[in-house]
Image (tube, rainbow, N blue to C red):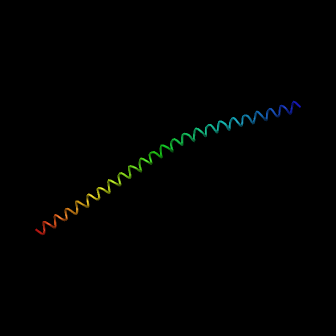
Amino acid sequence: MTEVVDADVRNLMRKCVKLFKRLEVAKAMRVYIAQHMDDSEDLRSKLKLAKSELAAAKKAADEGTGLLKKVEKERERRLMLRHAG
């Protein structure tokens, strides 16, 4: 009878050790995931900033193109007036 109890106790101790190891792994995974979630949030904020900067650059380029076209039209108009007069 004591042999059975000893075997049961040993089995319970092994299971306990395995459970503690699993708990340690779970804790390590939580830390890893939490750190990478923060990295992910940082990347998202950088991406958002880059998108807004890109939109501002496109807007500035469009405005510059519009101004350049106006200047070219005015230049052509003055050249035509100069040749006509």
Residue at 68% in and 38% down: 22
- Residue sitting farthest toward the top: 2
Q: Residue 66 location, x and y as percent?
A: 28, 59
x, y percentage for residue 60?
32, 53
Look at the image and tell me in which quarter the N terminus lies.
Answer: top right
Total marks in image: 0
Indicate left or right for 47 with 35 as reference: left
Residue at the farthest left position = 85
Residue 22 relative to residue 82: left or right: right
Above or below for 79 versus 49: below
Residue depicted at x 57% and y 42%: 33
State the image quarter where residue 68 is shown. bottom left
Q: Residue at x 36, y 51 (%)?
A: 56
Quadrant including the C terminus:
bottom left
Q: Is residue 57 above or below residue 72?
A: above
**Residue in the image at 69% along x and 35% along y:** 20
Give the quarter of the image for residue 31: top right
Find residue 79 and report its horizontal and vertical position in percent. 16, 65
Q: Is residue 1 left or right of residue 57?
A: right
Q: Return the x and y of residue 76 as percentages of the image width and height.
A: 19, 65
In this orientation, which residue lies closer to the viewer: 13 or 47? 47
Relative to residue 69, is residue 27 depicted above or below? above
Residue sitting at the far bottom? 84
Question: Does residue 6 appear to the left or right of 63 in the view shown?
Answer: right
